Amino acid sequence: EVQLVESGGGLVQPGGSRRISCATSGFVFSSYQMNWVRQAPGKGLEWVSFISTTGSTEHHADSVKGRFTISRDNTKNSLYLQMNSLRAEDTAVYYCVREAAQDAFDIWGQGTMVTVSS
Amino acid sequence: AIQMTQSPSSLSASVGDRVTITCRTSQGIGNDLGWYQQKPGKAPKLLIYAASSLQSGVPSRFSGSGSGTDFTLTISSLQPEDFATYYCLQDYNFPRTFGQGTKVEIK
């Protein structure tokens, strides 16, 4: 069974840092591009970051550029999001998402909640 | 960034109704658009990719159409389990952008 399981969410103070992780199983992780998508409480979906299969290419939303870094470890079948200089507006559920052929976001994790508050 | 205009933002419909949701993009994107369904407290689920291709396991009452700047998601006969929020997503370029969402409620 294909699975994406996020972890690492929690309460963070404004200006602080947090790294969230996504453990994957049931598919050849190194063959898939991956993304992070977030959803603030009661709001819509916002794409955050993309990483290529080898990790050589990244893209980020303007709202997080320069503060967030996406990475992956293909030996551990895991995806990461390092979040620095966190702001209240970064409060959201963060989803790990697999990108299939034709760029479809075909598999989503259950999400991990990050709350930025003092 | 490509702007997405999804409409309506919400609608009320009855079981058995035909429902149509539209998504308009600020520039042409070919057929690089997907549709996603999200139920409360759950992760989104892929319904349609490449504008009109049905994801495996998704009921055939869901269909997508369009290309360029105008796209449509149609539910041919609304079922109780279809009451949810629907989003379009362009995957033509970066940054990826979602529509604002359409909440489908029970009339």
Image (cartoon, coloured by chain):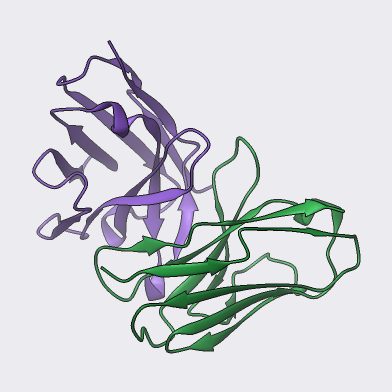
Q: Position of residue A24 (x, y in %)?
A: 38, 42
Q: Which chain is purple?
A: A
At a point 35% along the width and 36% down the height, the residue shown is: A23
In this view, the residue in front, A4 or B85, is B85
Q: Position of residue A102 (x, y in %)?
A: 39, 76
Q: Position of residue B74 (x, y in %)?
A: 70, 75
Image quadrant occupied by the C terminus of chain A: top left
Q: Position of residue B61 (x, y in %)?
A: 77, 73
Rendering quarter of residue A58: bottom left
Q: Is residue A44 left or right of residue A8?
A: right
At a point 42% along the width and 68% down the height, the residue shown is: B4
Q: Is residue B66 left or right of residue A115?
A: right
In this view, the residue in front, B97 or A106, is B97
At a point 80% along the width and 75% down the height, the residue shown is: B76
In this view, the residue in front, A42 or A20, is A42
At a point 23% along the width and 28% down the height, the residue shown is: A87
Q: Which chain is green?
A: B
In the displayed structure, A103 sits above or below B32; it is above
Q: Is residue B29 left or right of residue A68?
A: right
